[in-house]
Image (cartoon, rainbow, N blue to C red):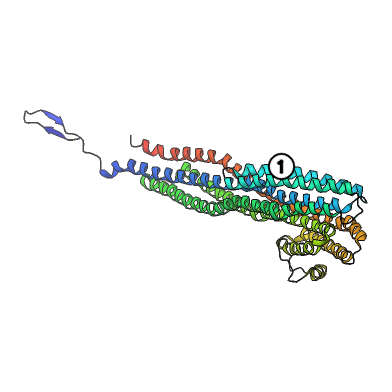
Amino acid sequence: MTMVRTPAGAVTRAPAAPPPARRRSVPGRIRLITGVTVVSLALLFAALAAGGSSAREGLRVIGRDAGPQVVATAGLYLALSDMDAQVANALVMGKDYPQQRQEATKAYDKRRAEAGAALLKAYELSLDDEAERTTVRSILDGLGRYDMLAGQALLLDEKAGHAAGPPPEEVVRTYREATDLMRQVLLPQAYNLTLENGTIVRATYDEKALWVPLWRAVVVVTGLIALGCLIWLQVFLARRFRRVFGPALVVATVTTAVALGFGVHVLGQDEQALRTAKNTGFDSVLTLAKARAISNSMQGDQSRALLDEERADTYKHTYFDKSLSLVFYDVGNLDAYHDQVTAGSTNFLGMLGPELVGSQGHAVFRAYQAFQTEDEKFRALVDEKRTNEAVAARVGPVTGAFTAYDDALKALAGTHQGVLARATAQGEGALDDLWRLLPYAIGAIGLLVIAGVWPRLKEYR
């Protein structure tokens, strides 16, 4: 400080010279770099939170909410088709198979209850979609009419007391009206309802399949920026104060890198979990549910061919069309189809084609082969007008082969259902770990940044 003499002769102290601008700017620069670092860290954790929330929403919809409900509504088609098949089974048995007839009517009542439950779930799933709710109400109304017609046919058949084979014409006419209502109205509506509900899952998956990888990329970018800012802050402090890197900021940098790596890994896991849950789980479960429904309708066509001789060729043709939809071969008639199935070509096409892989898939095809083999024998008896033997074959070997085939389908569907459940649980479990660790990481990094910067700012006070 310099001494200044005033005109009056007094000596006063001159004010101290201001510090260099460079020294005044150091705290400001520290605050600026620290602020940028904090913002970059906030963006990193916000991206992690957004990506995790998006993945969790996708897993919830596919694995726990709409996905299982859509599969349940697919059971509506199965229940309806089996209802009609069981009525045909009961009518064609006549008085010669009282135990089997009773079992068929019990199965009908069971499927009727399942159809009602599936319709209730479909109505709940429709939410505010008035078109879907209208479809559900239409199916309910039609189901009531079908139930009335089926009951009339069964009652008339019981009164007739006919032998196994075609029932009286009055019974056939009543059943025709019922089965036409089922096959031409109710089953197409049920199938369309399942397809419409499935769009919820597909739309959710398509959205999350886009956003989860995008959020993962955002996490990588914001994480690298945060790490760069932490390193920038450390380098600035080390050069400005001529010291080695501060341990607090080093630990903060390492912790940020660990959080970044863990977050990217979790989002990658969830991306894979979503893909597995949708493609290997949900899609296969839904496909197999549809295949079971079509197969049930096929075995119903066998009874219908016996029940209604006038439409026997029509039911044979519909059986052939349904067989082609399940396992496709480029053939022109049912006899040639039987030959191809027996030959066991593994170039599988059709609805079941993608599912007939691995040991369980091969087991399903072997059961399908056995069912088609029994159908070939059954058709020979029908063509030769050996009605009593055809009914006996239908009640015995054909039904046994179909039951084994349906059990194989159910077992394969159960495996894929397990894949869906495990993928959902694994994805949600990884997110749970991330949510547990994220608050601690945020708090620790924040405290470490303060511990690394605050001592340096205090030197300017």
Nearest the viewer among 242 and 84 is 84
Nearest the viewer among 87 and 25 is 87
Q: Position of residue 255 (x, y in %)?
A: 52, 44
Instruction: Classify 10 Å Cα crowding around label 1: few (below 14), some (14-19), many (20 and above).
Output: some
* Residue furthest out toward the left: 7
Question: Which quarter of the figure is the N terminus placed in?
Answer: top left
Q: Residue at x 61, y 47 (%)?
A: 132
Q: Position of residue 312 (x, y in %)?
A: 81, 62
Looking at the image, how many numbered discs can be counted on the residues? 1
Please name the residue that numbered disc 1 is placed on: 117
Whether residue 229 is visible here, answered yes or no, is: yes
* Residue furthest out toward the front: 170
Residue type at tag 1: Ala
Q: Is residue 438 above or below residue 213?
A: above
Q: From the viewer's perspective, tell me whether residue 36 is left or right of residue 216.
A: left
Q: Quadrant of residue 385?
A: bottom right
Nearest the viewer among 209 and 76 is 76
Q: From the viewer's perspective, tell me whether residue 303 is left or right of residue 291.
A: right
Nearest the viewer among 295 and 410 is 295
Q: Position of residue 80 (x, y in %)?
A: 74, 50
Question: Which quarter of the figure is the C terminus placed in?
Answer: top left
Q: Quadrant of residue 10?
A: top left
Whether residue 427 is visible here, answered yes or no, is: no
Q: From the viewer's perspective, tell me whether residue 311 is left or right of residue 459.
A: right
Q: Position of residue 56 (x, y in %)?
A: 58, 45
The secondary structure type at the circle numbered 1 is: helix
Q: From the viewer's perspective, tell me whether residue 366 is left or right of residue 55.
A: right
